[in-house]
Amino acid sequence: MSCSFGKNICYTVFGQSHSESIGCVIDGIPAGEKIDMEKLYSFMKRRAPGQDKFSTPRKEADMPSVVSGMLNGVTCGAPICAVIQNTNTRSQDYDKLRNLPRPSHADYPALIRYAGMNDPRGGGNFSGRMTAPLCFAGGLLMQILESKGIEIGAHIRSVSTVYDENIDFTTGSINELKALETKAFPVISDEAGEEMKAEILSARAEGDSVGGIVECVITGVPAGVGDPIFDGIENRLASAIFGIPAVRGIEFGAGFKAAEMRGSEHNDSYCLDGDSVKTKTNNHGGVIGGITSGMPIIFRVAFKPTPSIGKEQTSLNLEIKEEETFSVPGRHDPCIVQRAVPVVQAAAALVIADFLLK
């Protein structure tokens, strides 16, 4: 079931980048949850393509049609199915690529895995286009979680070598991050944001691309949620996050910097904050042993540069068994990090809801 995720809340995605439509089915959502559809559409619009010069020129409204599971904006207990039409495809751009696998795409592995029957148009079901239904499901679940005091915020931590301001690990800077949801380019520091934009436009002008990092914070999750060993919060978050195309890594709390620290630096001492048990620092990122500590859950996701670039590259023509020089046709993002911010939030919502909405 490679297209499904979750145990209590089961999310299944369907479609391909250039199929007639894409969508999802979400099973297990309790009845009686009121959903603000306008707020959900606004959340999805943050991911939608074709909105500015920093993303692909492919324009899609990404307006979901809810065909089951809701009545008058309230969940009814049945599986929720949402369908999003693909209206602006240019499949002819990919005619010459059937036998010319694009570097750093899933073209060749998919060709072998599915014996040549895979859909190569726009990356098929491996495309970032498939994150549109994820944002529908995640945006819906975020509203339910918010009603229970759980907030999920995120920002662009970096583009290339340009970094945004640090967040406060003990509070998660959640109010600051949630305020960014009204910004087209979600960074805390506008000055850093301008430098990031310059990096993206410079890469685009050269027919190239850049990658970056998204940092996500989840607050309000009580201590004691999760499981040890193979099914912990970190495990499940990593699994959902790696379902997002172009993800190359994830780290929690201090992350890989922990390897450079001493135990006396990394250890988070416990203390009382009123009647609540907290830690003075949060290098553990809100999870220890796969189980939440009550502190903000903090993680960062690394995205590779968009592999579809205008610069000339070489690949192997599988039909004639010779190398060819080519550039990737079509319409592509010079950097996907800006549009990936709500996608990371959506994936996080799937995981937390799956643990809590039993």
Image (cartoon, helix red, strand yellow):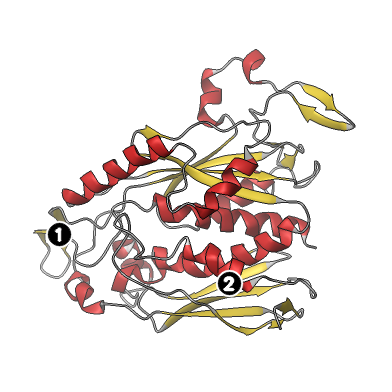
Which secondary structure, mark 2? strand
On screen, 74 above or below 302?
below
The residue pinned by badge 2 equals 12
Which of these two is toward me, 108 or 191?
Answer: 191
The residue pinned by badge 1 equals 327
Please state the horizontal and vertical placement of residue 131, each as a whole percent of the image: 47, 64
In this view, the residue farthest toward the right is 275
Which of these two is toward me, 148 or 293?
Answer: 148
Q: Looking at the image, which residue is at 81% across and 43% down?
A: 224
On screen, 204 above or below 19?
above
Instruction: Name which residue type carries label 2.
Output: Thr
Q: Is residue 8 left or right of residue 84?
A: right
Please state the horizontal and vertical placement of residue 6, each as a whole percent of the image: 66, 63
Q: Is residue 300 visible?
A: yes
Q: CA distance from mark 1 to mark 2?
A: 34 Å
Instruction: Name which residue type carries label 1.
Output: Ser
Tell me the quadrant of the picture where the N terminus can be found.
bottom right
Q: Residues within 10 Å of mark 2 (few under 14, many from 20)?
A: some
Are the residues tagged 1 and 2 within 8 Å (C-beta)? no
On screen, 11 above or below 80?
above
Q: Is residue 34 left or right of residue 183?
A: right
Please state the horizontal and vertical placement of residue 71, each as a whole percent of the image: 72, 84
Which secondary structure, mark 1? loop
Q: Looking at the image, which residue is at 42% across and 75% down?
A: 61
Please state the horizontal and vertical placement of residue 28, each as a whole percent of the image: 73, 71
Report which quarter residue 217 is drawn in.
top right
